[in-house]
Image (cartoon, coloured by chain):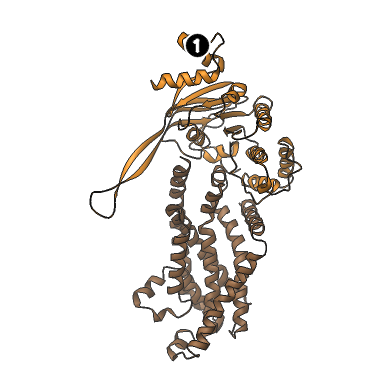
Chain colours: A brown, B orange
Amino acid sequence: MWRVIISTYRKNRIGILRAVPWSFMVSRIVTGVTQIIFPYFMYHYFIHGNLNSEFHEYANGADYMTYVVLGSALNVLAVSTLMNIGRALITELREGTLETLLMTPMPRYAYFCGCLLEQTARALLEFGAVMAAGALVGADLGYLFSVRAAAVILLAVFSFFCMGIALSSLMLYTRDTYLTQNTLFITMNLVCGIMYPIQYLPAGLQYAAQIFPLTPAVSLFRNVMIENQSLSGNQLLIWQIILLSGVYLLIGTVWYKEMELKLVESIFG
Amino acid sequence: MYGAVKGRPEDQNARKIIAQHLVKDYILKEKIKEKSGLFGRKQKKVIHAVKDISLEIPQKKIIGVLGINGAGKTTTIRMLASVIAPTSGSLTMNGVDAVKNHLWIKERINVISGGERNLYWRLTAKENLRYFGSLYGLSGDDLDKRITYLLRTVGLEEAANVPVERYSKGMKQRLQIARGLINDPIYLFMDEPTLGLDIVIAKEIRNLVSDLAHKEGRGILLTTHYISEAEELCDYIYILDKGRIIAEGTKEQLKGLLAYEPKVITSVQEPSLEEALIEIINRCNS
């Protein structure tokens, strides 16, 4: 199991570094910084820092930039994990290596974990860029280097991974990566409380937002980072994340097995 | 080791793959355009890719599967390699049920296809082999020694640290063979392994294939469109057409099938295997 995880990590890492040695890293950092610059300009030059008291109430007293930086940082991890786990197999299919992989007796989860490890290492670079840019524009990130924050990030990445497995099946089913992932990412950006509290959304959308693990994860992350709340005081959010992870993992596992069979037959038949 | 044997244990005396009455059907959904309305409706159509195939692949032998395009050769290989499950029929390897024990089977077989896919082009030969080796549970010194041995065997020692994207077609094919041998398989399925290669490299690969079976004792199933290749290498040949075995035997036996039909012999020489194959398929279709 570990052998497959580590070797898949290495294989993906070498492939990425040889494909785009340094420009890829720069693009990751630029993307992260842009996610902060845009709301910064909006906040300072468009609405001139005028937010009503409702916002402060919804945001646990945080200022707008702190709120946005925390949301964007976790969103970066979510998008990166979902994208890379979701399209891992379809990328193998496009590169012509899927058949050889499926012929081996390797456990599929070990393969996905290897992909997760590699992409998380890359996504953390973007996460760091968002946080650094956030600190430069005045976001309060004092509790970032705490065990609690690390635990929340780990839990969040796990939940994104579980959703990624389900997304992988969906991508194999539709044989599409761009439309599937971009529709999902835009929806998540709109309803999961990245740029604004979800309380501003219509009631129906607020309920819909709860099906994404990103929604409780970003709330938990903000609670820990803004108010230094304990994890035990956020049990409801933690359970919601675990429950959603379990559901997505179950859907992904059951569906994946069926999809792999169909995929193999449709491609190799 | 990923798989434990379910059902009957391995039989040391039955060193062969036995496929009996393998059938593979695919359900194809075809869109039917309605006279009115925006969306068409889908109709299911059953495609019989393999209708009834029984064959044996003993160790130390090269078994050829010949046939025109669409005869069902690749589907048969994929069923034998446990990549796709047969719709019906039985498949055993050394007495072990292959359908129930597909992980156990996958550890002991490998497939080598012609063409340039199935390799990571950005990785070097060594990195490719290390990755595929790890997927079979190999690691450390054992894996390193195996990689060195395989690269020497296929003549890629000097290019071991060069990314595959810089390889020629022949080098990629040789690396494919090394990849197919990484788990030291007992049985090898080779799907047109010399496809598109020049005569020198094709000859080298044929020599290697012969050694793998006759010197190293592996069972090999070979599909090829090059009849001379089958004539040179195969100990026994199955001829497939439209998902069925229409003839089988040694190359002499297959040629002998035509001896009873004097009209097909156009010269005083005995018919070639190619002539025999074409005649058998034509006769079957008429």
B45 or B260, which is in the foreground? B260
Q: Residue at x 51, y 57 (%)?
A: A87
Q: Is residue B50 above or below residue B286?
A: below
For the point 49% across and 85% down, which residue is it?
A60
In the image: residue B18, left or right of residue B28: right
Viewer-closest of B284 and B133: B284
Write down the quadrant of residue B198 in the picture.
top right
Near-viewer residue (A86 or A224): A86
Q: Chain of mark 1?
A: B
Report the side of B226 relative to B217 (left or right): left
Which one is nearer the viewer's eye here, B121 or A90?
Answer: B121
Residue under label 1: B265
Helix, strand or loop status at disc 1: loop
The image position of residue A62, as x and y in percent, is 52, 86
- Residue B54 location in percent, x, y? 47, 25
Look at 35% across and 78% down and name the residue there. A202
Across and down, in percent, residue A94 comes to 53, 50
**Image quarter hosting the N terminus of chain B:** top right
Residue at far right of view: B158
Say whether residue A124 is visible. Answer: no
**Where, quadrant-wise, is the C terminus of chain B in this rendering?**
top left
Residue at 66 percent across and 59 percent down: it is A17
B285 over A2 or under it: above or below: above
- Which amino acid lies under the numbered mark 1 shown in the image of this protein? Ile
Q: Quadrant of residue B112?
A: top right
For disc 1, the neighbor class at 10 Å (few under 14, some 14 to 19, many from 20) is some
Q: Position of residue A50 (x, y in %)?
A: 47, 91
